[in-house]
Amino acid sequence: MADRNVFLTGGTGYMGSRLIPRLLARGHRVTACVRRGSEGKVPAGAQALPLDPLAAAALKPVLPGHDTWVQLIGTPHPAPWKAEQFRAVELRAAHAMAAALPGSGIRHAVYLSVAQPAPTMKAYLAVRQEGESLLRATGIPCTFLRPWYVLGPGHRWPYVLIPVYKLFERFPSTRAGALRLGLVTLEQMLSALIQAIESDPPTSPCIIDVPAIRQAHLT
């Protein structure tokens, strides 16, 4: 496994703050792009780079020397009434990433998306789909991770739904949807992210859906 030079946006968030120490422990180098004033939230060992993660003009000059970009920027606790925030944050982040990638030297873009299709969260789904399309259009090898709900600290209430999911997975008419929109754990997500980062850049866009996230394992 070759060490990666990872550029990470969203590194102080729910997943990023837990991903960074694991990447460092596996020998990778991590630069975490953060808003000014948040440098102290970056886990020790990573380089904190204060700049606007929603501005391509700020991002592009700092990308040389990195080979992998991991995009984890997102609205905490997504909900249907946060549509404007999704477009103001997630979509702007995707536009900035797509504009900064060409000619940057980044060989692999890893993007946290969402399970699709889905019957709810239409605004969130639309923004993530647009983000995927923007990144595909760059021609840079991309991996899209598509969880639905991630179980972990502060995100435990859906555990009560596990028996319902198990029931739906038994019937042919509901099995595909129950698997596509299934629950994954934070540990599974972190393993899937690391596995994506350590993999060779895909020759065509790679989709890591819920069943694949559940099967992610590290050596």
Image (cartoon, rainbow, N blue to C red):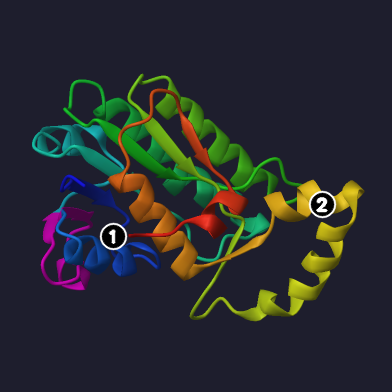
Residue interval drawn in magenta: 29-49
In front: label 1 or label 2: 2
Residue 66 picture quarter: top left
Which residue was labeled with disc 2? 175
Instruction: Give the side of residue 9 with respect to residue 213, left or right.
Output: left
Q: Residue at x 19, y 38 (%)?
A: 59
Q: Is residue 210 above or below residue 65?
A: below
**Label located before the other in sequence (1 or 2):** 1
Q: Where's residue 88, x and y in %?
A: 45, 45
Q: Secondary structure at mark 1?
A: loop
Q: Residue at x 23, y 68 (%)?
A: 21
Magenta-span inclusion, residue 41: yes
Q: Residue at x 80, y 74 (%)?
A: 163
Q: Nearer the viewer, residue 93 or 197?
A: 197
Instruction: Give the side of residue 57 with respect to residue 18, left or right.
Output: left
Type of amino acid under label 1: Gly
Q: Residue furthest front?
A: 219
Magenta-span inclusion, residue 140: no
